[in-house]
Image (spheres, helix red, strand yellow):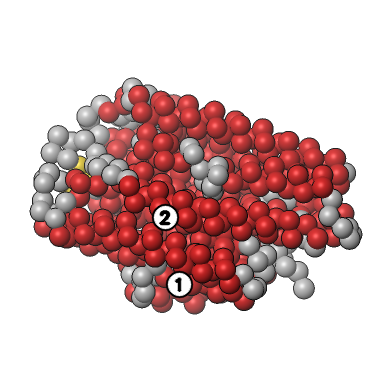
Amino acid sequence: MHPIFTSLAIAGPETILTLGSLAALMLGTFAKKANALATTSLFVVAILALAGFSLLDAPAGSLQAFDGLYVADAFSAFLKIIILAAAAASVLLALPWLGSSDGQGGIVGRFEYPVLMLLATLGLTIMVSANDLLTLYVGLELAALPSYVLASFARHDNRSAEAGLKYFVLGALASGILLYGVTLIYGFTGSTQFDVIAGVVGGQTERSLGLMFGIVFILAGLAFKVSAVPFHMWTPDVYEGAPTPVAAFFSAAPKVAALGLMVRVLVVAFPGVAAADWQQILIFISIASMILGAVAAVAQTNIKRLLAYSSIANIGFALVGLTPGTPAGVTALLFYAAVYVAMTLGSFLVVLQLRRPDGSPVEAMADLAGLSKTQPKLALAMAVFMFSLAGIPPLLGFWPKFAVFQAAMASGLLGLAIIGFIASVVAAFYYLRIIKIMYADEPGVALSSEGSAVNGMMIAGAALFCSPIGMLAITPLVAAATAAAAALFPA
């Protein structure tokens, strides 16, 4: 078989997503206008599912394709399944919003939304399989360009247009910073391929100042993608201004992909003496993200901005697991990423399901007052998500936090774990405040439910997963995360 066909077979999920995105665009263009959105969305979900199923029988071990630019292993497969599931949920949860007749933002029935989601997902899957700094950049940009359009998808809404512009400008700046880091790494190692870089770095006995600067710039670019402090400034504004389904997508799939990419870059490409440099950087980023995410959210009154600061804090907690650079730490991070996606998507689904009397979406936290009396099922689901995000046992959200702190302490990073615990206690305040508003405050605005059966089922499924019942999934989930992490640490 010709090498190009072998490479395309190894990159099966990306091949399916590429061909599927082209087919989806044609389908939406030529379908009847009245059915274009629903038809294209269901087709995109089917393509995402097909790409996911192609990962289930993936061969064991690590396979490289395209002359070492791409790698398929258990680590990338684990992350891709999470990314594809989050993307499929993001396409489905947007259907009522896109199909609404209130004309908000001039986006009713726009079939381009699922196509853009599919293209962004393609970039995300390339990111987690990148084995070269140039593949890393191609994946980042392929994911970013559709995301800029998605952020400003409500074309007639000034807030959405502003969110898209801010995301684009700051994203371009982050890409430039990352590319400068790539040039420094290439200049000091002579290669952009992770394996070759690791060989050069592993042979060094003392710190290279130029290499350290390259790592700093690359980490700065990746920190922007995961919304880590001090590169978080775009997150609250974009989450608030972007359409709620888009904010839900931004909070889940891109974060998982960027975390996975950060893990592969640091663990695979920069071992040995370079690890001491990036561990110091990660400690600072992790502590700053946990503290700012916990403290800044206390003053928020907009539910989407609060969830934005919540995502910043959660990224800080996840990076606690990466900081030791050990298999146990990476396992804890992967476990954290899987549970985080369910918690945050569930929270956004509840917000998206609610409507004010005039049909406008719910954004102010005060609007949730007395929700337990007007919409008891949605209030219960939201309470489960908030308790789980706060890390209160026995809900599922407690266990990944415990795992990342345990990994840090096992590596001697006791101070980092203690700071994380304190930040988690502070963050619990604003999660519990939402529960207090829903259950203790008197009803103000009479909220109605969107009534989408699919969204209702996804909320119920996510709530069950995050509830104590979800503890049944801990063993298989941790086993899968352990196998995924082992792929980065060959014996």
Please give the name of the residue rendered at 54% of the width and 28% of the height, measured from the top-left corner: 169
Numbered circles on residues, count: 2
Residue 243: where, in percent of width, then height? 36, 36
Mark 1 and 2 residues: CB-CB less than 8 Å, in contact? no
Task: Give the quadrant of residue 143.
Answer: top right
**Three-letter amino acid code at disc 1?**
Trp
- First in sequence: mark 1 vs mark 2: 2
Horizontal placement of 290 versus 296: left or right?
right
Residue 294, labelled with which disc?
2
Callout 1: SS? helix
Quarter of the rendering containing residue 268 = bottom right
From the viewer's perspective, is the residue at label 1 or at label 2 nearer? Answer: 2
Judge whether residue 53 can be spotted in this image: no
Amino acid at circle 2: Ala
Question: Residue 177, percent across and down?
Answer: 67, 36
**Residue nearest the observer in this picture, 218 or 155:** 218
Q: Residues within 10 Å of mark 1 (few under 14, many from 20)?
A: many
Q: Residues within 10 Å of mark 2 (few under 14, many from 20)?
A: many
For the point 14% across and 34% down, which residue is it?
358
* Residue at screen point 40% across, 48% down: 296
How far apart are the two marked residues, 1 and 2, measured between alpha carbons?
A: 19 Å
Residue sitting at 24 percent across and 59 percent down? Answer: 435
Horizontal relation, residue 17 to residue 305: left or right: right
Return the residue nearer the eye: 23 or 115. 115
Q: Nearer the viewer, residue 364 or 44?
A: 364
Judge from the rendering whether residue 290 lies leftward or rightward of residue 434; answer left or right.
right
**Residue ID for mark 1:** 399
- Check disc 2 and report its element: helix, strand or loop: helix
Q: Which mark is residue 5?
A: none
